[in-house]
Amino acid sequence: DSGVTQTPKHLITATGQRVTLRCSPRSGDLSVYWYQQSLDQGLQFLIQYYNGEERAKGNILERFSAQQFPDLHSELNLSSLELGDSALYFCASSVAPGQGRFEQYFGPGTRLTVT
Amino acid sequence: DAKTTQPPSMDCAEGRAANLPCNHSTISGNEYVYWYRQIHSQGPQYIIHGLKNNETNEMASLIITEDRKSSTLILPHATLRDTAVYYCIVRVATGNTPLVFGKGTRLSVIA
């Protein structure tokens, strides 16, 4: 158990809909990362937040957005869903202050199926 | 971040050492080598990282060549539960950056 939690585990929805994925980082971790894993693209970085602020952006579509709340949990919002958005979505966290360690710990993922 | 090259797949007999190679010939002086693995659609799991010295923890050993252009992850006594995709990633020392995953090596441990 990495200490990172993600909900829901599975999500099935229709094209054109909007969904929200939730992530709770490990206790004390300030950074949250979102990754997408599809069969043809592998694991790809989407976006990073650090202590509530956006830190880095990867290959995130304009239809996708994220935020990190004061309690450090994060949500990834996916809208106008398309069949190609079907994938595993992972959240990871890192950096408890003062520890000088930067390895990332991943949650179990949310499997999104768009029909 | 420097690019890495790994063999797409490897087999290892259960109980034997698994040696997974990684080439990172363009690595910079301030970049670490990290290893992660992913067991069948689970979240990737951190294994080990190093700069230039060999490292060992409860999961594995990491051997980095003197010129730092390649490294080897060693699982000393592979078990069936070590069957996974192993990713070698190079990233800057500050570390609070996203991971860039390649295709990794699919290790199959065979009974």
Image (cartoon, rainbow, N blue to C red):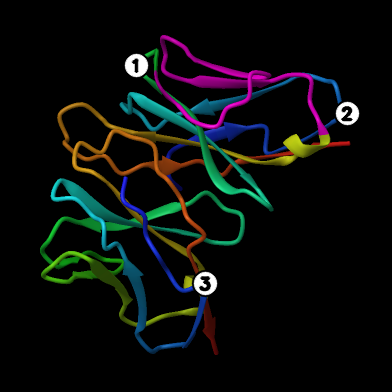
CB of mark 2 within 8 Å of CB of mark 1? no
* Label disc, if present, on residue B8 of the rendered structure: 3
| Residue highlighted by disc 1 | A51
Q: Are marks 2 and 1 on the same chain?
A: yes
Residue B34 versus residue A83 in the image, above or below: below
Are the residues at dot 3 and dot 2 in contact (C-beta closer than 8 Å)? no
The local crowd at label 3, few if under 14, some if 14 to 19, many if 20 or more residues have their Cα within 10 Å, is few
Q: Specify the amino acid type for callout 2.
A: Ala
Residue at 20% in and 36% down:
B94
Q: According to the image, label 2 marks what residue?
A: A14
- Left or right of B93? Residue A92 is right
Q: Is residue A67 magenta?
A: yes
Residue shown at 41% from the left, 9% from the top: A70
Q: SS of the residue at dot 1?
A: loop
Q: Position of residue A82 (x, y in %)?
A: 81, 30
Q: Secondary structure at mark 2?
A: loop
Q: Nearer the viewer, residue B79 or B103?
A: B103
- Residue B43 percent across, percent down from the top left: 52, 49
> CA gap, disc 3 to disc 1?
37 Å
Left or right? Give the position of A16 relative to B36. Answer: right
